[in-house]
């Protein structure tokens, strides 16, 4: 089990951790040291136990505030998701589109007229060329 030395409030501590978790421990120690530094700047030197307690409480307060904010954002997200689900589930009447249909009789009449025009054209062509 690896053992690393961390510094909190100007004091050194040897701490053991699981293999591979050294970085997490150093990050946590840095956060605690930052809070201890604030205390040291405001109050000056204090007993180790009191410094660690106060720094820990300051971090816990920050964590509680962040958790409250996360809960608020989660509630808003859940609300928006419910609104979107309601919109998706709502019955939407399809738009009615009417496409005009040419009656078969008109199509037949046009085909007959086209056939007559072709026959006339062929007749005129025969007379002029023939």
Image: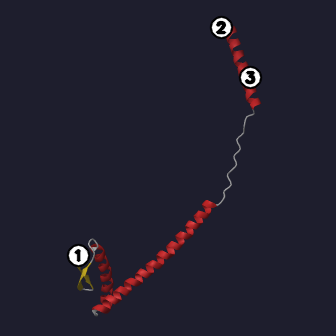
Residue situated in front as seen by the camera: 54 or 110: 54
Of discs 1 and 3, which sits in the foreground?
1
Determine the CA span between mark 1 and mark 2. Answer: 109 Å
**Residue on which disc 3 sits:** 113
Callout 2: helix, strand or loop?
Answer: helix
Quarter of the image with the N terminus in it: bottom left
Is 84 placed left or right of 45 in the picture?
A: right
Q: Which residue is mark 1?
A: 2
119 to 105, vertically: above or below: above
Q: Residue 54: image x %, image y %?
A: 35, 89
Relative to residue 126, is residue 48 depicted above or below? below
- Residue 26: image quadrant is bottom left
Residue farthest toward the bottom in the current orientation of the protein? 47
Which quarter of the figure has residue 59? Answer: bottom left
Q: Position of residue 124 (x, y in %)?
A: 70, 12
As helix, strand or loop, the secondary structure at mark 1 comes to loop
> Label 1 neighbourhood size at 10 Å, few (<14), some (14-19), many (20+)?
few
Q: Sequence-wise, which precedes: disc 1 or disc 3?
A: 1
Coloring scheme used: secondary structure
For label 2, count other residues whose C-alpha is less than 10 Å away and answer few (under 14), some (14-19) or many (20+).
few
Q: Mark 3 touching mark 2, by CB under 8 A? A: no
Q: Nearer the viewer, mark 3 or mark 2?
A: 3
Q: CA distance from mark 1 to mark 3?
A: 98 Å
Residue holding disc 2: 129
């Amino acid at each position: 089990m690896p053992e690393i030395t961390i510094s909190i409030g100007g004091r050194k501590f040897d701490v053991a951790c699981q293999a591979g978790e050294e970085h997490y421990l150093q990050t946590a120690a840095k956060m605690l040291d930052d809070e201890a530094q604030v205390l040291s700047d405001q109050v000056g030197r204090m007993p180790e136990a009191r410094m660690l307690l106060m720094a820990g409480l300051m971090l816990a307060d920050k964590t509680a505030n962040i958790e409250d904010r996360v809960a608020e954002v989660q509630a808003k997200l859940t609300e928006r998701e419910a609104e979107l689900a309601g919109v998706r589930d709502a019955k939407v009447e399809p738009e009615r589109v009417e496409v005009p249909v040419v009656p078969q009789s008109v199509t037949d009449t046009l085909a007959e007229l086209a056939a007559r025009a072709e026959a006339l054209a062929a007749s005129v062509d025969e007379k002029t060329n023939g």
